[in-house]
Image: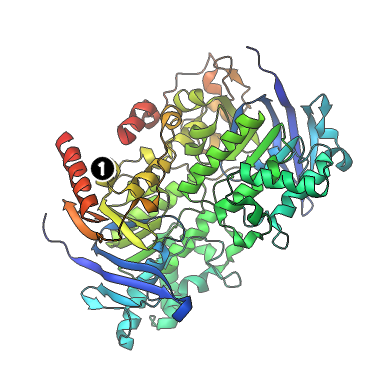
């Protein structure tokens, strides 16, 4: 495989909240790269820190250790004002709940244009209006929607407004934080298709945060599984589903309901018990077992993972 | 063995008055719930699945009313119930678990008291006896250390634990029917699997019939014995879970199955259901799904189809099943569904 351009690099990231006694480390020792043009997914249960990582990349949450690089430049911690502005513009976010993330008192035109207004990225009023119309068109909304309020729209349409608001900044990187979990099944497919089309037309890169693994498999190139603030496994999407190594990944995969009564009823549910790891003497490390498949574990576990990986590889 | 229906709804019609206009939310729905079974009702939001089942516990919003049909339960017609009749049924014989465990508990009251409330009201137990029953119930739904948890408030519980408490309240009086309205949509997948298992265990222990309302076909495959598919205020197809997944007939059921992300091919667009559901303020002619169905027949726009029987347990409301209809092929992507799922998850 040719060397791909790394858009985002996360190195030994730690994010904590509070200080002193109340200090709580939400994310620790997180390492991953996101290549240009790919969809990278972070999967884990609520409270695992997946949203926190996404927010840290967009400079919403401060980091306490480690580095985040955007196109090779450090973007966490103290950075120059110009770079700060650039990052805010180039890294946009789409939020989970389209009911809560849009300003109820503003018209769609203002909501979509707000980023441009804040950054003075327009020549005159006509140009501003033009850009808003273009963004609305791109996400499949009609021009007359610009003068309406968010409450007049359905869930799917609101999510499109949220996407238009991100797109208008001409971003290169989008953090999509559970963009479809609040939507209906039939609308989900539409929003996913829209995101996929935009990725192709605009050459976007996504960090997709989700807990629904069935969707993640369909849209992502690579998946990282996160548990309690640590990434425990990272692999290409199909690879992760075919050959999960870490017990947490296995438990997570077994919990996803399969829409097939025969398979679903005979399926065995695996339960993950974090106390199974004995890390008191043998410290765990983050190692590649092969072909871009990383897993977190101590020496003894690594041996087991490697054996399992080799077995899977020989069966293919 | 002939199974007995425990609830039997016939031609139920429900209307809402909204800003001086009338909305027909449910248009002649008939449904049987049998003893000990699990029935799943699926459909997109606004299809009326929640409204329909809310009538089984007398919890329609104030601006809604039942305008026709009957709902029979233990020889009584619940469609004609007044509020005082409901007090003997709701929470005791038929109870409901709501979607969001964050909002369905009283934040100012201790968890134990909230369970006790229902026990005292319906079972006539008082004081210590009721407290004991409440603690037993907490233990039964898998909450560790129930004596201590009894004295805690909802904010001290996680989402999954709160949903367990809500289920404990609903099941405290050993109801005959438990209605679960999207019980797991607000929860994580791992917690979801646990809650589904809990409901299944309780069902076995208490011999309840369970109605699931959901739009997740994965959950349906996990829990259901029978499935009813709803669209625009009507049931359009019902059958056993195998019949609905492997031998569906209604084009709307097909569309729901096609939109499954598990059937998606990477790099290709997922099939979507174009258009929007019909506006229920307007009179609907013919098959309500016809405007969104690319392969609709001419008659679909003119005349409403009746139910056609596919098997003893399976019926669909579509003209495709009429002997005079041209042969219509099921969409390619949902043929051999089972093999495809096995290939993806085997």
**Chain containing the residue with disc 1:** A
In the foreground, B55 or B294: B55
User: According to the image, label 1 marks what residue?
Assistant: A243
Q: Name the colour scheme.
A: rainbow
Query: Is residue B285 among what the camera can see?
Result: no
In the foreground, A173 or A30: A30
10 Å crowding of disc 1: few (<14), some (14-19), many (20+): some
Which quadrant holds the C terminus of chain B?
top left
The image shows residue B311 at horizontal and vertical percentages of 55, 15
Farthest residue, direction top: B1
| Residue found at x 29% / y 78% | A75
Q: Is residue B33 above or below residue A23?
A: above
| Residue found at x 56% / y 42% | B44
The image shows residue B114 at horizontal and vertical percentages of 73, 52
| Residue found at x 26% / y 55% | A297
B105 left or right, relative to A163: right
A303 left or right, relative to A140: left
Q: Is residue A177 above or below residue B52?
A: below
Number of numbered tags placed on the structure image = 1
In terms of secondary structure, where does tag 1 sit? loop
B151 left or right, relative to A172: right
| Residue found at x 48% / y 53% | A181
The image shows residue B153 at horizontal and vertical percentages of 67, 61
In the foreground, A132 or B264: B264
Q: Quadrant of residue B123?
A: top right
Q: Quadrant of residue A308?
A: top left
């Amino acid at each position: 495989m040719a060397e791909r351009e790394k858009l985002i690099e996360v190195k030994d990231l730690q994010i904590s909240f509070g200080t002193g006694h109340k200090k709580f480390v939400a994310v620790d020792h997180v390492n991953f790269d996101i290549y240009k043009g790919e969809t990278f997914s972070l999967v884990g249960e609520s409270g695992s820190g997946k949203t926190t990582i996404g927010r840290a990349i967009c400079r919403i949450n401060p980091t306490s250790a480690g580095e985040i690089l955007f196109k090779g430049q450090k973007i966490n911690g103290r950075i120059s004002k110009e770079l700060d502005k650039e990052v805010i513009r180039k890294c946009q976010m789409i939020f989970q709940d389209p009911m809560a993330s849009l300003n109820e008192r503003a018209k769609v035109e203002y909501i979509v244009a707000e980023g441009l207004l804040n950054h003075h990225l327009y020549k005159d009023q006509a140009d501003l209006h033009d850009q808003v119309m273009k963004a609305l068109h791109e996400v499949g909304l009609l021009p007359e929607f610009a003068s309406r309020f968010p409450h007049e729209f359905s869930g799917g349409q609101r999510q499109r407004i949220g996407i238009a608001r991100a797109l208008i900044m001409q971003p290169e990187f989008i953090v999509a934080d559970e963009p479809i979990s609040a939507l209906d099944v039939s609308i989900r497919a539409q929003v996913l298709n829209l995101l996929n089309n935009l990725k192709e037309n605009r050459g976007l890169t996504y960090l997709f945060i989700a807990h629904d693994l069935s969707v993640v498999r369909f849209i992502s190139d690579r998946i990282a599984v996160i548990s309690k603030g640590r990434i425990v496994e990272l692999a290409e999407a199909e690879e992760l589903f075919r050959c999960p190594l870490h017990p947490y990944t296995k438990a997570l995969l077994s919990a996803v309901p399969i829409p097939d009564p025969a398979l679903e009823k005979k399926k065995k549910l695996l339960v993950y018990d974090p106390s199974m790891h004995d890390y008191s003497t043998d410290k765990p490390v983050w190692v590649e077992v092969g072909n871009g498949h990383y897993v977190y574990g101590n020496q003894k576990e690594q041996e087991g993972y490697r054996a399992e990986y080799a077995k899977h590889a020989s069966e293919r | 063995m002939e199974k007995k229906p425990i609830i039997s709804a016939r031609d139920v019609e429900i209307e809402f008055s909204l800003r001086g206009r009338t909305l027909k939310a449910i248009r002649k729905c008939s449904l049987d719930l049998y003893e000990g079974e699990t029935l799943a009702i699926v459909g997109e939001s606004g299809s009326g699945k929640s409204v329909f089942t809310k009538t089984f516990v007398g919890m329609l919003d104030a601006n809604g009313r039942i305008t026709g049909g009957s709902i029979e339960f233990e020889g009584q017609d619940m469609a004609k119930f007044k509020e005082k009749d409901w007090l003997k049924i709701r929470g005791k014989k038929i109870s409901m678990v709501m979607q969001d465990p964050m909002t369905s508990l009283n934040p100012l009251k201790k968890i134990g008291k909230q369970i006790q409330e229902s026990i005292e009201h319906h079972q006539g137990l008082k004081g210590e006896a009721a407290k004991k029953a409440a603690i037993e119930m907490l233990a039964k739904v898998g909450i560790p250390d129930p004596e201590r948890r009894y004295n805690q408030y909802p904010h001290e519980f996680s989402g999954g634990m709160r949903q367990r408490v809500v289920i404990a309240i609903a099941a405290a009086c050993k109801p005959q029917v438990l209605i679960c309205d999207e019980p797991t949509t607000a929860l994580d997948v791992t917690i979801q699997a646990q809650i589904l298992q809990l409901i299944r265990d309780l069902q076995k222990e208490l011999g309840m019939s369970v109605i699931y309302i959901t739009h997740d076909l994965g959950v349906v495959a996990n829990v259901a014995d029978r499935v009813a598919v709803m669209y625009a205020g009507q049931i359009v197809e019902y059958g056993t879970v195998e019949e609905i997944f492997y031998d569906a007939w209604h084009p709307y059921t097909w569309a729901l199955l096609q939109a499954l992300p598990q059937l998606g091919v990477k790099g290709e667009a997922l099939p979507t259901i174009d258009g929007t559901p019909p506006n229920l303020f307007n009179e609907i002619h013919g098959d309500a799904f016809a405007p969104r169905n690319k392969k609709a027949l001419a008659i679909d726009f003119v005349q409403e189809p009746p139910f056609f029987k596919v098997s003893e347990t399976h019926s669909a409301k579509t003209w495709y099943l009429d002997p005079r209809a041209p042969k219509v092929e099921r969409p390619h992507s949902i043929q051999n569904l089972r093999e495809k799922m096995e290939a993806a998850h085997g």
